[in-house]
Amino acid sequence: MGKKKSNAPSSNMIAQNKKARFEYHIDETFEAGLSLAGWEVKSLRAGKAQLTDTYILVKNGEAWLLGSHIMPLNTASTHVLADPTRTRKLLLHRKEIARIFSRTQEKGHTCVPLKLYWKQNLVKCELALVRGKQLHDKRATEKERDWNREKARVIRDHA
């Protein structure tokens, strides 16, 4: 018996919030577990998740992931009414939740998820405490990215 082939990408990355790295300055990162239903895990194995416009809310000493979109598979969720944008609980230590809550109370600070990934057989979410970038910061980021791309192109052509 050979290994079962899957359609999912071979890396441990499920979804990434690329917009977050462009929109915000990242101050501190955390790793959180995710409380999921069975159909959600199957969808994540197929790589059907999206983190755009997602944020973290701390309420009553618990952290919640709001706005994430996990597309239900029609084969996995036949007997359950699947809500793709339901609020999912994040599993963090009490001290981490307290730190996130205190930092998000400061002006200009928020908490956003950066990526969803597999760690052995568990789904983890990388969170970041962030500050919003201003327009000139975004322009500088874009300029630096273009310069690095141009540098790589020159090196590749002359090598």
Image (cartoon, helix red, strand yellow):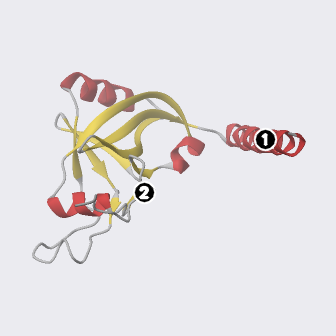
Front residue of 27 and 8: 8
Whether residue 26 appears in this view of the structure is yes
Q: Which residue is mark 2?
A: 9
Quadrant in which residue 37 is drawn: bottom left
- Compared to residue 50, the image places residue 128 above or below, namely above
**Neighbourhood count class around disc 2 (C-alpha, 10 Å): few under 14, some 14–19, many 20 upward:** few
Up the image or down, 159 lies above or below 9; here it is above
Where is residue 144, by image quadrant?
A: top right
Helix, strand or loop status at disc 1? helix
Q: Amino acid at mark 1?
A: Ala
Q: Which residue is mark 1?
A: 152
Q: Residue 27 at what x, y percent from top left?
A: 49, 27
Tell me the residue at 82%/45% (across/down).
Answer: 153
Q: Residue visible at 30% across and 58% down?
A: 45
Q: Amino acid at mark 2?
A: Pro
Horizontally, is 4 left or right of 80 in the view?
right
Q: How far across and down, in percent of the image, does residue 70 sit?
A: 31, 62
Picture disc at residue 89: none
Front one among 135 and 117: 117
Cα separation between marks 1 and 2: 26 Å
Asked where in the image residue 140 lies, by quadrant, the reply is top right
